[in-house]
Amino acid sequence: MSFSIGIVGLPNVGKSTLFKALTKKQVPAENFPFCTIDPNIGIVEVPDERLLKLTQISKSEKTIPTAIEFVDIAGLVKGAHKGEGLGNKFLSHIREVDAIAHVVRDFENSNIQHVENSVDAKRDKEIILLELIMADL
């Protein structure tokens, strides 16, 4: 069983891009909100030189490295805990993970849409944190 980390944030902030970088999986990462609806899941083995050394010492026939499961969860919006967008569905995916990696956009680029129509990292962070609190996560 692997440790699972859910990648969360507002729509269109780079969650799928981070997921692709971590897992090397090809998933859509487009310039429009809600490109991801169903969660993308990728499992990454964690390299550990100590494990390799132990395998050599014990002369084990098989080495099974630990793994981390990354879950690219669709973007949350303000009011998700009340069912806005597909909020309840997306929040249910967060309940299934062991940890949360929160992606916050803090760069200007007029070619990339922002669900709130402006970039404000503090506001965006607070939106997601409030949604998680209100959903009792």
Image (tube, helix red, strand yellow):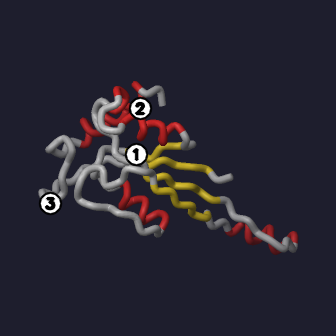
Q: Quadrant of residue 76?
A: top left
What's the residue type where badge 1 is placed?
Val
Specify whether 13 is left or right of 74. Answer: left
The residue at the far right in this view is: 58
Mark 2 and mark 3: span between their CA atoms?
29 Å
Q: Left or right? Give the position of 76 relative to 1.
A: left
Q: Which residue is mark 1?
A: 8
Residue contact at pointers 2 and 1, CB within 8 angstroms: yes
Q: Does residue 121 sit above or below 30 in this rendering? A: above
Residue visible at 18% across and 45% down? 119
Query: Which label number is shown at residue 111?
Result: 3
Rendered image: mark on residue 94: none
Disc 2 to disc 1, C-alpha distance: 10 Å
Question: At numbered mark 2, what does the secondary structure look like: helix, strand or loop?
Answer: helix
Q: Which residue is at the far left?
A: 110
Q: Position of residue 82 (x, y in %)?
A: 34, 26
Label 1 vs 3, first from the N-terminus: 1
- Which is nearer the N-term, disc 2 or disc 1? 1
Give the distance between the C-alpha atoms of the residues marked 1 and 3, in whole angstroms: 22 Å
Question: Dot 2 corresponds to which residue?
Answer: 132
Q: Position of residue 67 (x, y in %)?
A: 63, 59
If you read the primary sequence from the N terminus, does the residue marked by circle 2 or circle 3 appear first? 3
Let me know if residue 83 appears in the view: yes
